[in-house]
Amino acid sequence: MNEKLTKQNSQNLTGVFWMILTGIFFLGVTALVKFMGTRIPAAEAAFLRYALGLVLLLPMLKDFFHNLPNRELSILFAARGVVHTVGVVLWFFAMSRIPLADVTAMNYMSPVYVTLGAAIFLGESLALRRILAVLVAIVGAFLIVRPGFREVSIGHVAMIFTALFFASSYLIAKHTSGKTSASVVVVMLSIYVTIGLAPLAFLNWVTPTLIELMILFAVACFATAGHYTMTLAFAAAPISVTQPATFLQLIWAVLVGSVIFGEDIDLYVIGGGGLILCSITFMSWREAVIKRKAMTPTVAQTKV
């Protein structure tokens, strides 16, 4: 019994370690986009991030061509590509206009929107506990934005819709899970998003410098690494164990924003992000307790 418990504790620690590393990689993504500024339009920056990132998918192509999607899946992948494209553009737009901590904390709302979307569109039941958890998350979102108490910028509005579109993308992805390989899901999303972003990028094209191209390729590398370490975290420990570790990403975002970008430390944003994350963690824990098929994603699963 003790041996089994020790092994489980070891796996949990491993899972937390991988999730912490995931947070560092995704913080790298946000910090690099913030550092690049607004010279490159949001749609173009997003296009270059995905286009350059296609190089990283080459190892998956063999599996992709052996598992080509059927007509039904192709339609779902196309729909997800459209939704995700809009979310990515909004994220790049918000990232360069509001503090790092605000972007990180507001992105925590995506899993909450997934829970609501699953109830409305997929017939998932919403028990009283889950409804209360959603209400707590909404209170957290209001703490972050504080409408009526401070100016709500267009970046904050963009981030609200970013979380909604990423949640929609995740719901479509859940609908395709089990019907094809993970490689096909990743490759199809990357291809469709790149195609979707191309016309938006060329509408207002600004020739990037070599430094900007290098930054965007680094963004693609960090994002790919983050998704990989997130997979390792899920394999090592339950979501209910690894989820709280993502709060560290908010703390780091506050520190990086303050030290590197000179942003003010906003305790309301930290508190609001903490409330949202507690809500998500509680829903994940409840799903584990009642041994249902998990619907509430982690924060990292709804990233760019």
Image (cartoon, rainbow, N blue to C red):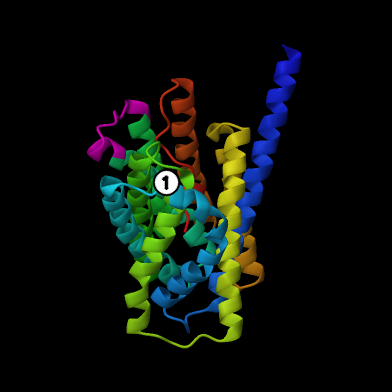
Quadrant of the image for the N terminus?
Answer: top right
Asked if residue 178 is positioned above or below residue 24 in the image, the reply reads above
- The answer to whether residue 127 is magenta is yes
Mark 1, residue position:
67
What residue lies at 52% left-to-right and 79% top-to-bottom? 37
Q: Position of residue 273 (x, y in %)?
A: 49, 50
Q: Is residue 163 left or right of residue 221?
A: left
Q: Is residue 181 visible?
A: yes
Asked if residue 295 is positioned above or below residue 44 in the image, the reply reads above
What residue lies at 37% left-to-right and 74% top-to-bottom? 198
Asked if residue 226 is positioned above or below residue 203 in the image, the reply reads above
What residue lies at 65% left-to-right and 44% top-to-bottom? 18
Asked whether 15 or 133 is in front, the reply is 15
Asked whether 160 or 219 is in front, the reply is 219
What residue lies at 38% left-to-right and 43% top-to-bottom? 112
Give the residues drawn in magenta, as a range: 118-129
Q: Position of residue 293 (x, y in %)?
A: 41, 28
Q: Is residue 39 left or right of residue 199?
A: right
- Give the amino acid type for the residue marked by disc 1 in the picture: Asn
